[in-house]
Image: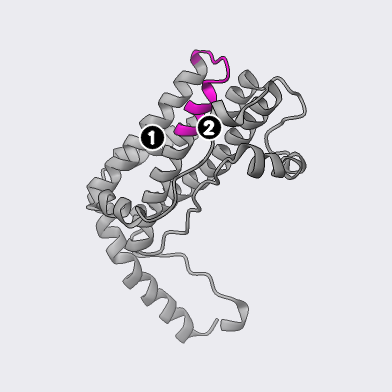
Amino acid sequence: MNFQVALLLTLVGIVASAPISDKLNNMDKDTIEQAHSLINKILEDIPTVHKDWITIKSLTLGNHTILQELGYLRNEALKIPPAPVLQNISSISSMETCLAKIVEGLQLHLILLKDVSKATTQDQRVKHFQADIRDLLLLIEKLQKQAGFDPSKQASDEQSQPPVHDFRADKNLSDKYLTQVAVHLILQQLQDFSFDVLRSILSMTEMAENPNTVQVSMSPAAI
């Protein structure tokens, strides 16, 4: 990389990250740390909750072959909606969108877990797990307010979109096997989504600690 390109990237990083750092400065660091700790706890608890809920041994977390085999059931029979996609945070707008998508994803999975719980037996561990997700949702909404983001604007922008999902326990879960598959797929999706949430929170933490730097991805041809 020549000197001019290196200097340009440094200047771009400083200019681009300054507005984000202003927003991050408005966020309570303890709230960010609480969110970090809670998403870690959720990720640690997902395998245990899965073990408590799932009795079919072939349904294991992280088994992508099984996920592919269950694709038809997921999309056609169960109609489980996908989790929102979280983009990398590189500007105030992308941070606002990311936090809104985290809220949307947590709300979605709370609805799915509540719905599937109607067709299953759950112990206190599962209830505490759902409570942790609700607590994380409240923390993310708190960060939105601290940053001055308007969640109602995000909601109004999405009013024209179709309903969140068509999954209903009383309609889609016709037998024990489908119920087990639904719980497995929901927890697997929640695990994947939670890893994305963790990466986003870590990104915010990194930018808060190093406000004058930003990660820039460039192809070798551009250098």
Residue 206 shown left or right of residue 154 in the figure? right
Residue 149 shown left or right of residue 9 in the figure? left
Q: Quadrant of residue 35?
A: top left
> Which quarter of the figure is the N terminus placed in?
bottom right
**Label for residue 189?**
none
What is the C-alpha distance between the residues marked 2 and 1? 24 Å
What segment carries the magenta color? 111-124
Q: Secondary structure at mark 2?
A: loop
Tag 2–tag 1 contact (CB < 8 Å): no
**Label for residue 136?**
1
Q: Which residue is mark 2?
A: 168
Q: Please check the rendered image and state whether residue 132 is part of the magenta-colored stretch, yes or no.
A: no
> Which quarter of the figure is the C terminus placed in?
bottom right
On screen, 143 above or below 138?
A: below
On screen, 48 above or below 25?
A: above
On screen, 212 above or below 68?
A: below
Residue 91 in sight in this render? yes
Colour pattern: one colour
Residue 32 percent across, percent down from the top left: 34, 42
Residue for point 28% across, 64% down: 19
Hey, what amino acid is under mark 2?
Arg
Residue 128 percent across, percent down from the top left: 45, 20
